[in-house]
């Protein structure tokens, strides 16, 4: 299952260029230079927050600050406004000068809150992601999946799988796996997170999580594979042994 490397890619069409004040762009990069994830996430609408994991966003913020340094100037070059029935959409583009490089930034807001953004810089490169700054949310995700799987909560467990995994393992095949493992293992008695490791290649970035399982009839292990796409980790694989 081949995928592209992690990237910030929330794109949209911009209108005619004009000279305006920085506004949203200025707020965004001030938050970026602060290094505080909360300062950036509080600028986002819920629909964007659903696409962002804080430990991945923090890794990106750290890489930007380490490789490019602090912002020196922001030249906003484009802005368009579109009035919807219930909200106002604003799209902006800017050239941002840092201590050690430059970036092109495009952003879109709805009623003043971010719904899309894309920051591109040669100085950042495509190798900035070395793993999330914290793995706890993924450890809990893995535990939830295994619990649902082992307890026969088939639909809930299957819903946690990324659509790319669901294309490989359809709902019927997944239900068959649940039934087979439940029959061999019996009821779940103890589930323990053991360790994790980051696996990064040219094609994809993974977090591998390992668990020990003790059940009524057997003991075993489970590997959960989290793949990072954009700024979010997705459940893209599992292996019970």
Image: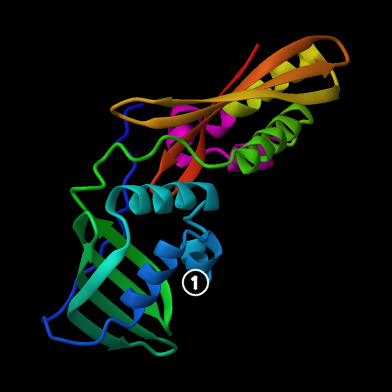
Residue 170 falls inside the magenta stretch: yes
Q: In this view, does 19 lie above or below 10?
A: below
184 sits left or right of 61 in the view: right
Residue at image coords 30%, 36%: 127
| Image: magenta residue range | 154-173
Drawn side of residue 20 relative to residue 139, left or right: left
Q: Nearer the viewer, residue 236 or 185?
A: 236
Where 63 sits versus 216, above or below?
Answer: below
Residue underneath mark 1: 45
Q: Is residue 53 visible?
A: yes
Q: Which residue is drawn at 35% across and 31% down?
A: 204
Q: Is the magenta stretch mostly helix, strand or loop?
A: helix
Q: Which of 177 and 56 is in front in this view?
A: 56
Whether residue 155 is visible here, answered yes or no, is no
x and y percentages locating residue 72 in the rendered image: 25, 69
Q: Which residue is drawn at 58% across and 41% down?
A: 134
Q: In which quarter of the image is residue 211?
A: top right
Quarter assignment of residue 205: top left
């Amino acid at each position: 299952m081949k995928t592209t490397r992690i990237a910030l890619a929330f794109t949209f069409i911009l209108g005619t260029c004009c000279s305006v004040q920085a506004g949203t762009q200025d707020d965004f990069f001030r938050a970026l230079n602060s290094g505080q994830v909360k300062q950036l996430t509080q600028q986002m609408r819920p629909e964007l927050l659903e696409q962002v994991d804080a430990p991945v966003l923090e890794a990106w913020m750290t890489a930007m600050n380490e490789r490019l340094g602090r912002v020196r100037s922001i030249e906003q070059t484009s802005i368009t406004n579109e009035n919807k029935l219930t909200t106002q959409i604003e799209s902006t583009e800017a050239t941002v000068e840092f201590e050690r490089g430059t970036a092109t930034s495009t952003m879109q807001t709805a009623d003043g809150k971010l719904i899309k953004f894309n920051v591109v810089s040669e100085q950042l490169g495509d190798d900035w992601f070395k793993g999330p700054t914290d793995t706890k949310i993924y450890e809990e995700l893995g535990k939830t999946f295994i619990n649902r799987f082992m307890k026969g909560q088939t639909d809930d467990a299957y819903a946690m799988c990324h659509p790319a995994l669901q294309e490989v393992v359809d709902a019927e095949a997944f239900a068959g796996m649940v039934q087979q493992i439940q029959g061999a293992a019996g009821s779940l008695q103890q589930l323990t997170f053991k360790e994790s490791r980051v696996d990064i290649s040219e094609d994809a970035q993974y977090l591998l999580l390992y668990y020990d399982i003790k059940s009524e009839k057997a003991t075993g292990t489970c590997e959960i594979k989290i793949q990072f796409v954009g700024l979010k980790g997705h459940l893209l694989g599992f292996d019970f042994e």
